[in-house]
């Protein structure tokens, strides 16, 4: 993904959107948010990368190769994005509440991918949930489902 394409994507995220994000943008915003959460603790390891790929493949019915390509694009976007608010606002405005709960669950899956609740990742996710408009109770239940899936 070129720097121009990344800049165009980030510019689209900053614009007030209509009812829903176009599907490619919604996918990329979610993937970039997953990458941001995984990188929050300063470690971005193979387990987290594999978990992101599995989450993307499952959520969007992608092949392993397509999920890996989406993640790679998201890594480039995440590295250029100035803040987390752009991703969360785009997702909040463009994704219905019930689907946002599954987004939080996917984020928890990535946080728990290495078997630990790292302080930085945990703090970022606790900031992201309200930005997505997710209530604490629903975030907690999503965390429990993600932990159960990991077990």
Image (spheres, rainbow, N blue to C red):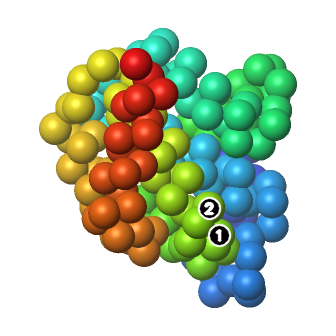
Residue drawn at 60 percent across, 44 percent down: 31
Q: Position of residue 146 (x, y in %)?
A: 43, 36
The disc placed on residue 146 is: none
- Left or right of 45, for residue 95: right
Residue drawn at 62 percent across, 55 percent down: 29
Question: Where 108 sits versus 62, above or below?
Answer: below
For residue 10, what is the image quadrant? Answer: bottom right
Which quadrant is the N terminus positioned in?
A: top right
Residue drawn at 37 percent across, 51 percent down: 141
Using the rendered image of the protein, determine whether residue 37 is visible from the camera's viewpoint: no
- Left or right of 127, for residue 48: right
The mark tally for this picture is 2
Question: Where 43 sits versus 5, above or below?
Answer: above
Question: Where 90 sits versus 59, above or below?
Answer: below
**Of tags 2 and 1, which is closer to the observer?**
2
- Please name the residue that numbered disc 2 is placed on: 99
Question: Where 26 sits versus 40, above or below?
Answer: below
Closer-to-camera residue (84/124): 124
Q: Are marks 2 and 1 in contact (CB under 8 Å)?
A: yes
- Please name the residue that numbered disc 1 is placed on: 95
Which quadrant is the C terminus positioned in?
A: top left
- Left or right of 148, for residue 11: right
Q: Position of residue 18 (x, y in %)?
A: 74, 86
For residue 137, what is the image quadrant? Answer: bottom left
């Amino acid at each position: 993904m070129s720097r121009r394409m990344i800049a165009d994507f980030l510019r689209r995220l900053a614009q007030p959107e209509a009812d829903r994000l176009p599907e490619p943008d919604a996918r990329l915003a979610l993937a970039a948010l997953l990458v941001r959460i995984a990188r929050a603790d300063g470690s971005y390891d193979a387990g987290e990368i594999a978990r992101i790929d599995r989450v993307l493949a499952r959520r969007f019915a992608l092949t392993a190769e397509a999920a890996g390509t989406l993640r790679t694009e998201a890594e480039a976007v995440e590295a250029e994005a100035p803040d987390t608010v752009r991703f969360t606002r785009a997702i909040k405005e463009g994704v219905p509440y019930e689907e946002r709960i599954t987004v939080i669950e996917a984020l928890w899956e990535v946080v728990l991918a290495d078997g630990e609740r790292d302080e930085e990742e945990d703090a970022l996710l606790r900031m992201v949930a309200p930005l997505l408009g997710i209530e604490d109770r629903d975030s907690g239940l999503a965390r429990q489902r993600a932990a159960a899936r990991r077990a």
